[in-house]
Amino acid sequence: MAQETSPLSGLFKNGADRLVLLGKHHHALMKGYVDGFIDETAFSDQTLKKLIAARIVWRPDEQQPLMLRPLVSELIASMVADESRRQINADVAEKLEQIRIKVQSWRDAYYKGDYSIAERQMQRLVELVHDLSGQFEEAIDSLWHRLNNDFGFVSTLNEKINENKRAQNQVRRLLDGLDLIVFHELIEFAENNSSLRKILVSQLQLRVSLHHSSLLAVQQRLVDLMAKFRQQQSRTLLVTNMAAFLHQHPHYQPASYSERREVPDVFNIASPLSLHASISLDRTVDRQVMAEMLLALPRASAIPSPVPKNAGSVIPPIDEEVAARQVALKMDVEDFYVFAAGQSGPVSALHYLTENHLNWDGEIWLYQVITEFQSLPLTDKPRFWQRCDERQASPVNDLRIISDVIIGVRGK
C-alpha cells in the first residue's frame, strides 16, 4: 500500500508547499495583482527564487518587472469574480479580440483627456499581451514535460506512436494559434503610436519568434526520440526472441561460428584482416630459394608512353574578334584622353561617348576610362585629374555606383 501512494506523496508535498507560499505572501501577491506588477523590494532574494521556481511569478522579459503567472491571475480573478480580468474563454482569437477592445478603450480615453483611465487601460493591455504570450509558453512547457516524462517511459511501440501523435497534434494546435496573430493587422491597429507599436509589434513579435523556435526544437526532439526508441526496440526484440528461443530449447548449445564456412551477418560484423608478407633478408639459408622465386616471376613489359613530336601550346587561344574589340576600345579611350588634353575645361566620359556615337556599353566605357587613367605613365599622369560622380545604391545599402567619370587637365 505504501508503494501505491508513494507517487502521490511528491505531488502532495509540492502542492502543499506552493499553497503555503501563496498564503505566506498573500498581501504582497494580491498587491501585485492589483498593481499589475510585483514589488521585488517586498521579498528577499531567497523568497523570489522560491516564487519563481514554484511558477507563481515570472518575468516576461529582461526589461519588464516581475508579474503573476497568467494561471495565478486567472485563479484570483475567478475567486474574487473580477470580471475585468476574468478569462472565460482562453482561446487565442478571443484574446486577440480582447486586445483590440482594450486598444480602442485606451484610444477613446486618451483622446478625451482621461489620462488616468488611459494609463489603466494601457496596463490592462500589457497584461493581456503578456498573458497571450504566457499561454503559449505554458503550453510549450507542458509539451516538454510530456516529452521528458510520458513520452520517454512507454513500453510498447503502439503507445509510443500514440504519444507521438498526441504531441504532434498539440504542436499543430499551437502553430495554428500562432498563425492567428497577424502582425500587419496589429501594425495598422497601432497606427503611429510608439507605445502601442512596442507592445503589439516589437515585444509580441519577439515572443512569437521564440515560440516558433521552441516548437521547432520540440519537433526535432520528437523525431530523435522516435528514432532512438526504434533502435532500442530492435535490440530489445532481438534479446527477447533469443531468450524465448533458449526457453523453448533449454539444451541448445551454440556452435563455434569460427569453424563455419558461412557466418551469419549478425555475427560477421568484424572487418577482415589484411595479411602482409615481406622477404626476410637476414635468413642466409633461404637466399637460394628466394632467388629462384624471383627469377620465376613474370616480368612486366614496360611500354614507354609516346612522346608527341610537337608539343602544343598550353595557353588557350584568344578569340580574334574579342582581341580586336579590346584594341578598338583602348584606342577610343586614348582618343578621349587626347581630346581631354586639348580642352580648357573638364570633359565628361559619357558625354564624349554620346557625342561621338561610339558603340560601347556605358559601364564598359567608364571602366576602361578609369583603367586607362590608372595605367598612365608617371610622367603624364600628373597632368590629368579624375573625378567619379557616385550615387548610393539605396537608402539601406551603402554601395556606391559610379554614374560618370570627369577628366580634366591640371593648370600649369
Image (tube, rainbow, N blue to C red):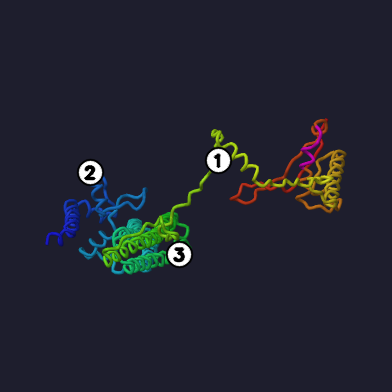
Q: What amino acid type is highlighted by mark number 2?
A: Ser
Callout 2 secondary element: loop
Asked if the stretch drawn in magenta spans residue 369, the answer is: no
Measured as percent of width and height from the top left, residue 242 is found at 32, 63
Residue occupied by mark 1: 278
Measured as percent of width and height from the top left, residue 223 is found at 40, 61
Residue occupied by mark 3: 182
Q: What amino acid type is highlighted by mark number 1?
A: Ser
Measured as percent of width and height from the top left, residue 142 is found at 31, 60
Q: Are marks 3 and 2 in contact (CB under 8 Å)?
A: no
Span shown in magenta? 370-377
**Mark before the other along the chain sequence, 3 or 1:** 3
Residue occupied by mark 2: 44
Distance of mark 3 from mark 1, alpha carbons?
77 Å
Callout 3 secondary element: loop
Of tags 3 and 1, which is closer to the observer? Answer: 1
- In depth, the one of 5 and 158 nearer the eye is 158
Which quarter of the picture shows residue 228? bottom left
Q: Using a 10 Å C-alpha cutoff, classify the residue at mark 2 as few (fewer than 14 neighbours), some (14 to 19) or many (20 or more).
A: few
Look at the picture and state if 98 lies above or below 29.
below
Look at the picture and state if 290 lies above or below 362.
above
Q: Using a 10 Å C-alpha cutoff, classify the residue at mark 1 as few (fewer than 14 neighbours), some (14 to 19) or many (20 or more).
A: few
Distance of mark 3 from mark 2, alpha carbons?
41 Å
**Mark before the other along the chain sequence, 3 or 2:** 2
Of tags 2 and 1, which is closer to the observer? Answer: 1
Q: What amino acid type is highlighted by mark number 3?
A: Val
Q: Residue at x 31, y 60 (%)?
A: 253
Q: Main secondary structure of the magenta part?
A: helix
Residue 142 as seen in the image, left or right of residue 322: left
